[in-house]
């Protein structure tokens, strides 16, 4: 957890707006066009373990009131440099609670002060653009957050089990090899089955041969 926070903070201090992924999250398409259209409001965009799409389109964020309760999966996320203060808070929480999952602490920090959806925001706060883009406010109402669509920023369940992007005829932006067992071996097997993993030719010519039918 601390290594991830150190990397993020280093990038944010340099003025970068990074897209960060875990090693087991496959990037299949450039997410820049999707992120750019959510500017200038969006500051944090994160994938979700939500198991169903809450929107009819694949090019918009999930409906926050319906998807926000599921786990925010920080294995793939976008963070803008102006949320450095919140990420420093997250880093401190990870340091103070080394036995707690950094992913849960990430959500806990951004939930400080409660999550504010457009319909429940104070009248003096104009959230029309936020509402249109399915953004909501966290961290005492100072950070605009969005839940990336589960149909195009896929978990292992929406991609390998439900085959949501395949059924919708779209190319996803990412595939995270979650929702499976057997660790790295299982993740590689999932990718091989989906023809998303390239092996050396020797893999297909083992010394004992292959069983075919």
Image (cartoon, rainbow, N blue to C red):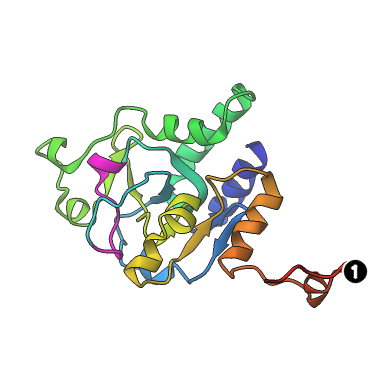
Q: Quadrant of the C terminus?
A: bottom right
User: Is 31 displayed left or right of 147 in the figure?
Assistant: right
Q: Nearer the viewer, residue 163 or 73?
A: 163
- Asked where in the image residue 4 lies, by quadrant, the reply is top right
Any part of residue 45 in sight:
yes
Q: Nearer the viewer, residue 174 or 103?
A: 174
In this view, 77 is above or below 49: below
Q: Residue at x 35, y 72 (%)?
A: 169
Q: Nearer the viewer, residue 142 or 30?
A: 30
Q: Residue at x 33, y 35 (%)?
A: 69
Tell me residue 27's x, y (percent).
Answer: 54, 65
- Asked where in the image residue 116 lies, by quadrant, the reply is top left
Q: Residue at x 63, y 23 (%)?
A: 99
Q: Nearer the viewer, residue 188 or 17?
A: 188
Any part of residue 79 in sight:
no
For the magenta stretch, what is the residue range? 57-67
Residue at the limit of the structure toward the front, as seen here: 213
In this view, 175 is above or below 142: below
Residue at the limit of the structure toward the right, as seen here: 207
Q: Is residue 167 magenta?
A: no
Q: Which residue is mark 1?
A: 207
Q: Quadrant of the N terminus?
A: top right
Q: Main secondary structure of the magenta part?
A: loop
**How many other residues sit within 10 Å of disc 1, few (<14), some (14-19) or many (≥20)?**
few
Q: Residue at x 14, y 47 (%)?
A: 126
């Amino acid at each position: 957890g601390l290594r991830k926070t150190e990397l993020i903070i280093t990038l944010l201090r340099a003025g970068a707006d990074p897209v960060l992924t875990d090693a087991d999250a496959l990037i299949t398409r450039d997410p820049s066009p999707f992120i750019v259209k959510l500017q200038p409001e969006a500051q944090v965009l994160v994938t979700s373990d939500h198991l169903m799409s809450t929107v009819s389109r694949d090019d918009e964020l999930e409906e926050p009131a319906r998807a926000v309760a599921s786990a925010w999966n920080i294995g793939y996320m976008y963070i803008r440099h102006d949320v450095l203060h919140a990420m420093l808070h997250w880093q401190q929480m990870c340091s103070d609670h080394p036995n707690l999952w950094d992913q849960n602490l990430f959500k806990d920090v951004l939930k400080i002060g409660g999550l504010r959806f457009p319909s429940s925001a104070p009248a003096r706060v104009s959230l029309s653009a936020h509402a249109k883009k399915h953004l909501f406010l966290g961290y005492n109402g100072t950070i605009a957050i969005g839940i990336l669509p589960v149909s195009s920023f896929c978990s292992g369940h929406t991609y390998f089990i439900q085959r949501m992007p395949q059924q919708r005829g779209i190319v996803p932006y990412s595939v995270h090899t979650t929702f499976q067992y057997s660790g790295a071996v299982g993740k590689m097997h999932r990718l091989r089955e989906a023809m998303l993993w390239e092996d050396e030719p020797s893999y297909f010519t083992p010394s004992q041969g292959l069983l075919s039918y």
